[in-house]
Amino acid sequence: MPKRSPQQIAEQAHSRIAALRSELSALDYVCSGTLLERMKTCGSPACRCAHDPAARHGPYYEWGHMKAGKLLHRLVSAEQAVLLRRAIGNYRRLKKLLRSWEAETERLIDLSAARKR
Ligand SMILES: [Zn+2]
């Protein structure tokens, strides 16, 4: 493979950044944290859930995330859980795209320093 010129490397970095930006603009809901799905007992000794694990209530959805440096947990409905699952997936994708964007930017910064030498 022939060695790429600084010009070609820069063009490739710019086109990768353009692709990253277009993928970023397609993201809508974004949430950090994790979504837990769990079954619960109600605490009543007369209820079937007290003895039969299969008779536990739920599922309940619990969203755990950091807010102002604290880990918060809140219950969400099944409908909200669907949106949250998508938002959490988007958030992970977003972080991955940002890391790539940063790497391409570093490449361009290194190229600009090399040209002035
Ligand atoms: Zn119960």
Image (tube, rainbow, N blue to C red):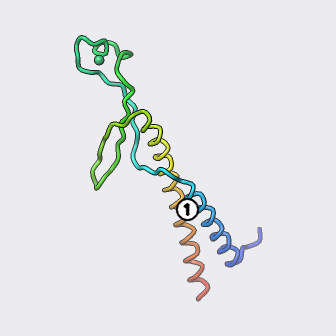
Q: Is mark 1 within 8 Å of ligand 1?
A: no
How far across and how far down the image is residue 72, in percent? 29, 45
Position of residue 104 in the picture relative to residue 56 (left or right): right
For ligand 1, the image quadrant comes to top left
The image quadrant of residue 57 is: top left
Most foreground residue, 82 or 11:
82
Residue topped by disc 1: 100
Kindly give the residue lying farthest to the right in the view shown: 1
Position of residue 69 in the picture relative to residue 36 (left or right): left
How far across and how far down the image is residue 93, in percent? 52, 52
Figure quadrant of the C terminus = bottom right
Query: Going 63% across and 62% down the picture, which residue do you hit?
Result: 19
Most foreground residue, 105 or 31:
31
In the figure, 85 relative to 94: above or below? above
How far across and how far down the image is residue 43, in percent? 23, 20
Query: Going 28% across and 55% down the picture, which residue do you hit?
Result: 69
Q: How many marks?
A: 1
In the figure, 59 relative to 81: above or below? above
How far across and how far down the image is residue 36, in percent? 39, 35
Position of residue 81 in the picture relative to residue 2 (left or right): left
Q: Assign a secondary structure to mark 1.
A: helix
Identity of the amino acid at label 1?
Ser
Query: Going 31% across and 52% down the picture, which residue do you hit?
Result: 67
The image quadrant of residue 105 is: bottom right
Kindly give the residue lying farthest to the bottom in the view shown: 117
Figure quadrant of the N terminus = bottom right
Q: Residues within 10 Å of mark 1 (few under 14, many from 20)?
A: some
